[in-house]
Image (tube, helix red, strand yellow):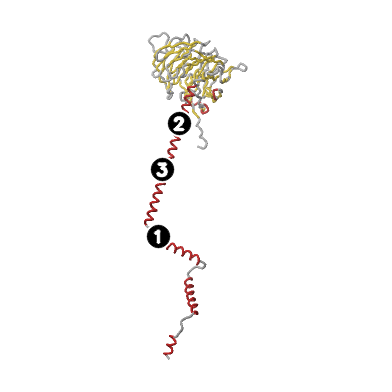
Amino acid sequence: MSTAVATRKRAKPAPGPGAAPVAGKRRRKVDSAADRGKPKGGGRMNEEISSDSESESLAPRKTEEEEEEELEETAQEKKLRLAKLYLEQLRQQEEEKAEARAFEEDQVAGRLKEDVLEQRGRLQKSVAKEIQAPAPTDIRVLRGHQLSITCLVITPDDLAIFSAAKDCTIIKWSVETGRKLHVIPRAKKGAQGQPAGHSSHVLCMAISSDGKYLASGDRSKLILIWEAQSCQHLYTFTGHRDAVSGLAFRKGTHQLYSTSHDRSVKVWNAAENSYVETLFGHQDAVAALDALSRECCVTAGGRDGTVRVWKIPEESQLVFYGHQGSIDCIHLINEEHMVSGADDGSVALWGLSKKRPLALQREAHGLHGEPGLEQPFWVSSVAALLNTDLVATGSHNARVRLWQCGEGFRQLDPLCDIPLVGFINSLKFSSAGDFLVAGVGQEHRLGRWWRIKEARNSVCIIPLRRLPVSPVAGS
């Protein structure tokens, strides 16, 4: 029986095609058991991720040589970047240098243009619109003269002021401290062995452009030459036959022009202590004189009603008419233009190319007197800041008036008034234009027609502050 059973076991047939499904069922069971730990619905995503990771894992690794090549390329890129940055810096520096050169060239061109205009007498810097009216408390008053101030000058370096008065004295003042630096006392007539000085009213003064010589003229027909630094008397010029009313040095030289009530104009050389020549032409006493660098001078002819330009080498003169009254003061603005004032209350701007005023301002300081009998205030002094559009005038109406000249000096507009009581007998701007000096007296410098008792005989320093320049939009 056992033999039959063993035979049946060995004779058992091999599994046929029907056995395949059984094996498949077992695999699905195994697979389903493995899938139990996977989230539902994420089979396909997980398959993609696994395939990517497999591809990454299968990607070949870079060799050390390739990494070194990449490092070398990065260093080259850095060098290239630094080189480009350096070139950019060089370009910016060159642009800045080019801008600086262009700016300097513009400055040089502007300066050359100014020099050319100055030589031609047409330079007109715009300054007046920047001037701010000073407060009365800012005005410094220097007192030292006993009688009315008649004239004054400022040294070229703006450090000192010389003033003279009807008391026959000359005082040198320090602009910074306001103290007296030196006093030239009055000289007694006919006295021998006494220090040099004036024995009569000093009417005019002038100082050379290098600040070396000071000249003063008086009613005694004398011109005294002083060393400006030490106030030592050097010599005396005689020759005028009446009071010396005007003095001016030619700019850049020691040539001295003088004028007098004897109607003449004389030329001197202060450095050589010599007389040069005399010119005639005015029909009345000459009241004032001024000069710049050209070999010519301008004079105010007083009651002959003329302004004259004297050409010294040619010994010729140009005659100008315009005022109705006596022309008592005159001042050059530049080589081609001038301003004058008269006792008819008018202020005139002149150009050498025209015989009539370019601009005429009547009643410049107003009127005074009873109703129906009003008279204009005399214009007793004028001053101009060289080569600019700023002009100042003085009278006895208790104010100094500043004016702005229009383009081409064809208009004269009032700027502001500076309160100052008394006769304004002399006005002078500093070279830098930062202050104005006024010589004030109780009486007019040429006579005693009125007396203002409340006035003080003094030298007044008026600061001229400029308004800050507003920044340009977008800067």
x, y (%) of residue 200?
Answer: 45, 12
Which secondary structure lies at badge 2?
helix
Which secondary structure lies at badge 1?
loop
- How many labels sit on residues? 3
Q: How crowded is mark 1: few (under 14 residues within 10 Å), some or many (20 or more)?
A: few
Asked whether the viewer can see residue 148, the reply is no
Which secondary structure lies at badge 3?
helix
Q: Do the residues labelled 2 and 3 touch (CB within 8 Å)?
A: no
x, y (%) of residue 337?
Answer: 52, 20
Q: Do the residues labelled 1 and 3 touch (CB within 8 Å)?
A: no
- Which of discs 1 and 2 lies nearer the camera? The answer is 1
Q: Which of marks 1 and 2 is nearer the N terminus?
A: 1
x, y (%) of residue 304?
Answer: 54, 12
Residue that carries the numbered disc 2 in the rendered image: 105
Q: How far apart are marks 2 and 3 (CA)?
A: 28 Å
Q: Which of 181 and 314 is in front in this view?
A: 314
Task: Specify the quadrant that holds the N terminus.
Answer: bottom left
Q: Earlier in the sequence, mark 1 or mark 3?
A: 1
Asked whether the viewer can see residue 65, the reply is yes
Q: Residue furthest right?
A: 372
Q: Distance between the residues labelled 1 and 3?
A: 39 Å
Q: Earlier in the sequence, mark 2 or mark 3?
A: 3
Residue that carries the numbered disc 3 in the rendered image: 86
Amino acid identity at mark 1: Arg
In the visual, does 398 lie left or right of 100?
right
Q: Residues within 10 Å of mark 3 (few under 14, many from 20)?
A: few
Q: Is residue 106 above or below residue 453?
A: below
- Which of discs 1 and 3 lies nearer the camera? The answer is 1
Q: How far apart are marks 1 and 2 (CA)?
A: 66 Å
Amino acid identity at mark 3: Tyr
Q: Nearer the viewer, residue 198 or 407?
A: 407
Residue that carries the numbered disc 1 in the rendered image: 61
